[in-house]
Amino acid sequence: MTAVAVAGGALTTAAPAQAVAGAPAASGSYAFAAKLEIGDGQRNCSGALVDRQWVLTAAGCFSDDPNDPRLAEGAPKSKTTVTVGRTDLSTSGGAVTEVSELVPYAGRDLVMAKLAKPVSGITPVEVGSSSPKQGEELKVLGFGRTKTEWVPNQLHAGSFTVNSVQDGKLAITGKDSAVCKGDTGGPALREQGGRVELVGVNSASWQGGCLGMDPAETRTDALDTRVDDISTWVQKVRYRPVFASAPWNKATHIATGYFTGGSAGGTRHMDMIVRWNDSEMTLYQGGDDKDAKNPFVAEYQLGKRVEEDPKTNWQYAKQITGASFGNGSDGLVVRWGDGELTQYTHVDKDGFHGEKQLAPRYNSTWGHAIQIAAGRYSANAQRDDLVVVWDDGRVTMHPDLDTNGVKPAGQKTLVNKNTTWPHATQIASGEFTGKKTADLLVRWSDGEATIYPGVDTAGLHGETQIRAKGGDWTNAIVVGAGAFVANERPNDVIVRWGNGTLSMYPGVDVGGLHDQVKIVG
């Protein structure tokens, strides 16, 4: 394996480099450090376990030309074996498994390597989210070459000082160590107050003092790929298989909003709450990039299955909708099977807060509501105006729920009694057409889908057909709208289909639906 080489006075990667020529790591320490053997030992690299089933390492380890770390997503071309949880490779501890999938980060010498099976008993390293500072000391690990050994069986660690922080890169210098062949992909760590964080990944170095190098070469400078500024990407990649493995054919309701933080125009996109047919409630946290295929990065259980908690009530929820009540975070409106209407002013990963009864149980009115959707339909800037479809076909609006509740005196009639609107099987609030107020998306029982632009207290103002009756939307079982991609306004539509797959239509506008992006299935 060729070494990291120097060209034109700059560091360049001629091939994956091998171990930090520092002191051996103490037995049992840094158990998350990983050794990678690529192509039956043709290449050796290092890495770090960042999840039970994912190792973060350098993309150049797997590319045909290590000078060009661009890599296609998918299975590695060569068999790759990963050993993790074993600082001394001559022992039998830890786990040994193969890599089944590679997910590179475009534009950086960085890749997430998925293990064929998750490992147990080894705590992954946490990915840092704050930038290293010039002069800061980092600990760098690797299984590569040392000053005296070609292929050591021991993890080595060395102290390095940050010289400069660049866009996507860290320039570092070894205080008592050098990054050698086989250390490519190894972790650069911040250690403070007993806390260890991954902030960089070895990419290239001068290899001063490494066995096999010209004795005249004494420079210990190295270049690492930063990971502190892409911690959300790491979180998203490792979460992808978890999200896809959920039983989406059992999702019965969707509500969207900023439940875990963020707001329109910010970096954090909308979240999604899902009610399942076993009463479980799950909160899916939105990401902070524009990846429509993978919009969520984590999940939190808000309500347990009936089998786990016989006292749960979520199996009785008939409709749910996300709403904003002006307190800096979003909440939920729920219509229950007994006619009760409840406002949860704030919802977060810890549950439901600020419960407020809008209508009591067994009332004579709300048992006749068949669809609800909260949105920004009045002059109030909050998304807490409630549109309701009734079983007699009427469509009404209750503006500013938090202040006015659902008192009949404040109710606005948008559509009078008719025989059409009882066929509205799904409704969702979105901002697709650029009007002053929100739009209403309706999926009808015959599969037709319609957008009503700029709904306000005066009523509906025209309609746009986005799917004809009898088409594919006949199988659209659950429909929701939110800001999952661009995060400027809630104009992305998410659909759970009858076959259990999940899709998104990003950027729905006056022209209707555009590209369909498959999320699951």
Image (cartoon, helix red, strand yellow):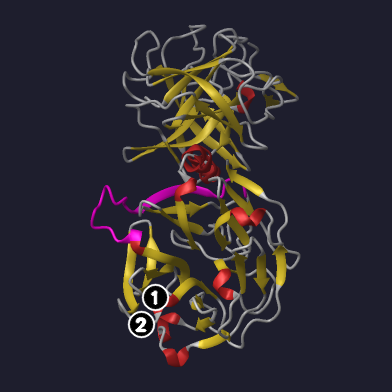
Magenta range is 292-315
Identify which amino acid the numbered label 1 is placed on: Gly
Residue 288 locus on image (x, y percent): 56, 53
Q: Is residue 294 magenta?
A: yes
Q: Residue at x 33, y 67 (%)?
A: 353
Q: Is the residue marked by circle 2 packed among few (<14), some (14-19), or many (20+) residues within 10 Å?
A: few
The quarter holding residue 364 reads bottom left
Q: Secondary structure at mark 1?
A: helix
Residue 248 versus residue 381: which sits nearer the camera?
248
- Residue 485: in sight, yes or no? no
For the residues labelled 2 and 1, the Cα–Cα distance comes to 7 Å
Residue 434 locus on image (x, y percent): 69, 73
Task: Decide: is 62 above or below 259.
Answer: above
Residue 357 locus on image (x, y percent): 32, 77
Q: Which residue is mark 1?
A: 367
Numbered disc total: 2
